[in-house]
């Protein structure tokens, strides 16, 4: 417990230091840089033309589709991680069995990938 | 557990703080150096001189840039979402910084030995994409939005091959602890057993960093800067710093995981100086190769980029994992790993070559194209 | 909009209007196109030109014939010699002036050199469009610089040469002209193969440019395209061959054509055309002999009898035509400049629709527009 | 250039001039054009480079269509389209045609009287006429009936009342000055 705590103290500290670095840089800029209240400077860059509408609109489904496929495979990767480290000397089970079980698992996902491929979900449109 | 710094037993908080301080200093210097070196190297590739005016051989260029950027007016578009816009900078920069905790620079020279180091690195590295998406969304700019969405799509697509490539290596190494992985490569670096994993990792690494040929998010000729188009001054430079820090980090990880970090070929016997030098040389070579790719490669298009990840890299990395498992379970000779990995690399290049030569059908005429009248 | 209507459309995806230009890194000057995009696919594109319109035609009507030469430089500023050539030839046609041989050969050399420098500009800019970080640009600019230096030695200016005159040339070329041209050709030949090595064989470059922005030969003719952009579609239309002017009938060169009319073919055509230009210049240098560069009796103030002529020459971007109507006197009654890029640009919409945003950029790049010429 | 065309020095008598004009026309493709344009009121004139044919404005688009579709002439390429302001005599619209296969040129002109500055659009014949007509329309105030996209091309969209390339459009101060300077030069000579 002590080791774990000691290790992740550094992680916490790293995030704090990172935050402070960014903040100090922004603060330094706030102090040193000029600041104007001219309204024209607040317009967004639209190649020199005035923007017509707000930019944030509803965008196509395809991003959502990729996100779903991503989550499936990422979760799968998370499942594979513990297996990958322990299947060789699996306590209480023959390692070959652990391996072939994972082959089946990956195979099912492979079928899923093939299906998505076939359906054209992987084709960016 | 080594909470002794320079041989003194100290409080873990103080120890961590001291190490982080050291890392902060090192990182700042290295990143500034990298910016200078990249400019010099790219200039040489392009038959230019690069920075020459600031200090001897232009060495002070990065410092001058930093000073200029701090003194530059910091604009925020009136239509931007203030909180998301401001916070995006932190989300981009802090995760990169956090990754340094697990990197082994030399024997017993790291901030902390994390038992799940590789896993931690992978997990934290994907956070900064959130920052890019936030930046793109909050800027109230169409280019930024397209850039942000591109960044997200690209990052999630290459995340999986990256993770699986590292996983394949972890299987062979038998650990997720970065220090153990490095120490285990005293005789033979893992790139020998896992060339395909290295190839996949290298490509996915370029994509994760958003460097050429995968720089479609920034894509200067299309989206004119992508997610950080509306950022200026020091806030923009934070994106820039994060990019270079990520370059440094991912090359460090690649050199540790695949090239044997400080261990290969001299082992643990030699002094720390040599180990640091080895790490630096390997990382430097990788960084140089990234620069080299940057000056010679055109940019991919988004559909090519996505299909390459999902249709080529992902299946290949799965096959690699299954093959690794087979060899390890039945205790076949390691040479088989080399053979299959090598065959995989050849296959990868063949697939790329075939894909390039294959003609792409003209996109089907759309409804808008058929009508003659101009809007 | 009522709230109910708004709720009904709440989850509909919308086509985004993306405004590209006039201040955009890859619109090659002040060109603007409004893309209607669905995700990343371009559904419609509306080009806007005219930001660089300076009324060149009207201005020329108020100018002496000789002053007009300078203005031609300012329309087609990347291939000013070719622009000047069309203009002075139009004046010569209407005025009935005979140009001495030496002047014609020198004009040919300079025009072909200008084609080289203009195409170098294209390859560099196109490399950047495709996404090479500046390397193509610096490589080709080194070569362009050599050509430009030569122009400066001859004309005294790097961009606005104003060197051709109705009837001949403004002054004799420098003494070491031939030797300098040989030097420039040697470096250009190296530069062409450099560009070939950097781009034409690169896998990503091929993947990006092949089968993108295809336009068929019939469509290209229908839109009035010309120059390499038309020849890439497989139409061997080259004014230098079809209606030889200067001494093009006496030199040996091939008309380079493409097959599919895609972006890659347009790039390839330009590269191969540069090799042909080198070939032409070499032949010109062999035929160059001492002699006068202006007709014997050249009036101090040029007066042109009534008449009209439409003179077209093959400029790097296509047909650069000058339609000159004279009603006597010392200035044109009407001067119309037929711009190659204006016609080429019309076809942009056909080529872009259905492709991705990134393709729209390289398709625009592959037409190689010069906005000074489009807007005049 | 390829063909010499007519030069300024004519014969003394009218008969000589007419004969020479006939001879000049015979060197051009007028015979073919005349055959193709049968039924259309066309008057030829040998130009410095190409044959110039004037067609009444009501028939000009029909004539262009015929010239494009004729198998032998096959004018499939519209080189240029513009106009000339002849002040009191109206505005002349000029079409420069080319055949990519037969490689010959012709210039077609149509005179529009000042009262009725309108002509049918040629975009139905060649798509290339689209922008060229837009430019001509905004610069001269010529209306092209049936044009699919009659917006301004080069000028600002709200500049609809002035036509810069007409001769009565005032010159800017600097242009006027330039004109004066030249007038001085002419007198000096």
Image: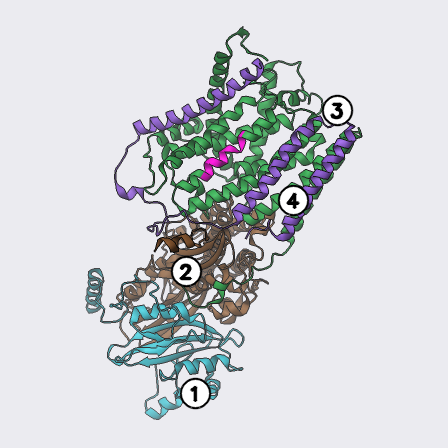
Chain colours: A purple, B green, C brown, D cyan
Q: Is residue B32 above or below residue B356?
A: above
Whole-number angstrom distance, CA of label 1 to CA of label 4: 73 Å
Residue B223 placement, left or right of D88: right
Quickly name the residue at label 3: A89
Quickly name the residue at label 4: B312
Whole-number angstrom distance, CA of label 4 to CA of label 2: 37 Å
Q: Is residue C177 above or below residue C243?
A: above
Residue B293: x and y, percent? Answer: 56, 39
Residue B129 is covered by the magenta coloring? yes
Q: Main secondary structure of the magenta part?
A: helix
* Same chain letter for marks 1 and 4: no
Q: Secondary structure at mark 2?
A: strand
* Residue range highlighted in magenta: B124-133
* Residue B279: quadrant of the picture: top right
Q: Chain of mark 4?
A: B
* Same chain letter for marks 2 and 3: no
- Asked if labels 4 and 1 touch by Cβ distance under 8 angstroms, the answer is no
Whole-number angstrom distance, CA of label 2 to CA of label 3: 65 Å
- Asked if labels 4 and 3 touch by Cβ distance under 8 angstroms, the answer is no
Q: Nearer the viewer, mark 3 or mark 4?
A: 3
- Asked if labels 2 and 4 touch by Cβ distance under 8 angstroms, the answer is no
């Amino acid at each position: 417990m002590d080791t774990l705590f000691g290790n992740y103290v550094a992680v916490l500290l790293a995030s704090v230091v990172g935050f402070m670095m960014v903040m100090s840089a922004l603060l330094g800029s706030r102090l040193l840089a000029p600041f104007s209240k001219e309204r024209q400077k607040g317009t967004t860059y639209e190649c020199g033309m005035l923007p017509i509408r707000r930019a944030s609109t509803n965008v196509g489904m395809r991003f959502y589709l990729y996100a779903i496929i991503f989550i499936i495979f990422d979760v799968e990767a998370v499942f594979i991680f513990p297996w990958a480290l322990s299947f060789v000397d699996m306590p209480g089970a023959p390692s070959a069995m652990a391996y072939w079980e994972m082959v089946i698992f990956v195979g099912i996902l492979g079928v899923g990938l093939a299906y998505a491929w076939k359906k054209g979900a992987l084709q960016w449109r | 557990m080594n909470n002794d710094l320079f041989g003194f037993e100290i409080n873990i908080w103080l120890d961590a703080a001291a190490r982080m301080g050291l890392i902060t200093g090192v990182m700042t210097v290295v990143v500034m150096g990298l910016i200078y070196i990249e400019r010099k190297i790219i200039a040489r590739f392009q038959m230019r001189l690069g920075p020459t005016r600031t200090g001897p051989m232009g060495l002070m260029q990065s410092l001058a840039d930093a000073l200029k950027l701090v003194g530059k007016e910091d604009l925020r578009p009136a239509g931007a979402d203030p909180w998301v816009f401001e916070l995006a900078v932190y989300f981009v920069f802090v995760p990169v910084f956090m990754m340094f905790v697990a990197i082994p620079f030399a024997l017993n020279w790291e901030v902390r030995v994390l038992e799940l180091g590789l896993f931690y690195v992978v997990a934290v590295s994907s956070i900064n994409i959130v920052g890019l998406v936030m930046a793109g969304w909050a800027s109230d700019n169409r280019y930024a939005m397209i850039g942000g969405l591109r960044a997200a799509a690209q990052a999630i697509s290459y995340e999986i091959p990256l993770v699986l490539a590292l996983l394949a290596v972890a299987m062979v190494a038998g650990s997720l602890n970065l220090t153990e992985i490095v120490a285990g490569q005293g005789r033979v670096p893992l790139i020998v057993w896992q060339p395909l994993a290295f190839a996949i990792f290298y490509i996915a690494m370029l994509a994760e960093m958003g460097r050429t040929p995968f720089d479609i998010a920034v894509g200067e000729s299309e989206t004119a800067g992508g997610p950080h188009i509306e950022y200026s001054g020091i806030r923009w430079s934070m994106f820039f710093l994060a990019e270079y820090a990520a370059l440094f980090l991912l090359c460090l990880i690649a050199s540790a995981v695949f090239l044997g970090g400080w261990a290969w070929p001299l082992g643990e016997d030699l002094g720390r100086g040599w180990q640091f030098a080895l790490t630096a040389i390997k990382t430097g070579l990788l960084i140089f190769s990234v620069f080299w790719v940057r000056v010679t490669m055109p940019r991919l298009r988004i559909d090519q980029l996505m299909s390459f990840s999902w249709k080529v890299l992902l299946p290949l990395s799965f096959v690699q994992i299954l093959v690794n498992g087979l060899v390890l379970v039945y205790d076949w000779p390691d040479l088989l790993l080399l053979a299959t990995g090598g065959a995989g690399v050849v296959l990868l290049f063949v697939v790329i070559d075939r894909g390039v030569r294959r003609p792409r059908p003209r996109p089907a005429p759309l409804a808008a194209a058929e009508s003659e009248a101009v809007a | 909009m009522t709230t109910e209507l708004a709720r009904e459309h709440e989850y509909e995806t919308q086509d985004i209007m993306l405004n590209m230009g006039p201040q955009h890194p890859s619109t090659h000057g002040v060109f603007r196109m409004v893309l209607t995009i669905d995700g990343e696919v371009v559904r419609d594109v509306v080009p806007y030109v005219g930001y660089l319109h300076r009324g060149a035609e009207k201005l020329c009507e108020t100018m002496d014939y000789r002053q007009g030469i300078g203005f031609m430089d300012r329309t087609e500023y990347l291939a000013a010699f070719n622009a000047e050539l069309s203009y002075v030839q139009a004046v010569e046609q209407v005025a009935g002036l005979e140009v001495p041989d030496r002047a014609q050969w020198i004009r040919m050399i300079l025009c072909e050199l200008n084609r080289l420098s203009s195409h170098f500009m294209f390859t560099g800019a196109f490399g950047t469009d495709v996404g090479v970080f500046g390397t193509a640009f610096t490589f080709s600019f080194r070569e362009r610089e050599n050509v430009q230096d030569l122009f400066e030695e001859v004309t005294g200016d790097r961009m606005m040469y104003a060197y051709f005159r109705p009837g001949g040339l403004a002054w004799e070329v420098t003494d070491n002209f031939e030797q300098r041209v040989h030097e420039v050709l040697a470096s250009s030949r190296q530069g062409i193969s450099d560009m070939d090595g950097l781009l034409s064989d690169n896998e990503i470059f091929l993947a990006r440019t092949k089968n993108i922005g295809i336009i068929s030969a019939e469509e290209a003719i229908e839109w009035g395209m010309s120059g390499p952009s038309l020849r890439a579609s497989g139409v061997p239309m080259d004014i230098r061959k079809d209606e030889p002017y200067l001494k093009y009938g006496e030199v040996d060169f091939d008309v380079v054509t493409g097959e599919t009319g895609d972006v890659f073919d347009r790039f390839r055509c330009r590269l191969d055309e540069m090799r042909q230009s080198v070939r032409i210049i070499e032949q010109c240098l062999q035929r160059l002999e001492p002699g006068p560069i202006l007709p014997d009796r050249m009036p101090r103030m040029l007066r042109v009898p009534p008449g009209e002529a439409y003179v077209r020459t093959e400029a790097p971007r296509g047909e650069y035509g000058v339609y000159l109507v004279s009603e006597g006197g010392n200035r044109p009654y009407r001067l119309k400049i037929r711009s190659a890029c204006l016609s080429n640009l019309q076809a942009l919409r056909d080529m872009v629709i259905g492709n991705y945003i990134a393709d729209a950029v390289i398709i625009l790049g592959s037409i190689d527009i010069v906005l000074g010429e489009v807007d005049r | 250039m390829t063909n010499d065309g007519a030069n300024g020095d004519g014969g003394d008598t009218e008969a000589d001039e007419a004969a020479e004009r006939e001879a000049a026309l015979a060197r051009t493709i007028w015979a073919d054009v005349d055959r193709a344009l049968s039924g259309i009121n066309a008057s030829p004139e040998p130009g410095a480079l190409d044959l110039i044919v004037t067609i009444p404005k009501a028939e000009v688009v029909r004539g262009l269509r015929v010239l494009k579709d004729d198998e032998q002439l096959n004018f499939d390429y519209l080189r240029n389209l513009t106009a000339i302001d002849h002040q009191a005599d109206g505005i002349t619209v000029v079409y420069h045609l080319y055949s990519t296969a037969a490689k010959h040129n012709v210039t077609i002109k149509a005179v529009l009287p000042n009262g009725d500055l309108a002509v049918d659009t040629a975009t139905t014949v060649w798509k290339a006429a689209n922008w060229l007509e837009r430019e001509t329309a905004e610069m001269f105030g010529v209306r092209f009936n049936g044009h699919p996209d009659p917006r301004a091309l080069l000028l600002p969209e709200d500049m609809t009342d002035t036509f810069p390339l007409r001769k009565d459009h005032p010159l800017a101060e600097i242009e006027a000055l330039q004109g004066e300077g030249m007038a001085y030069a002419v007198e000096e000579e």
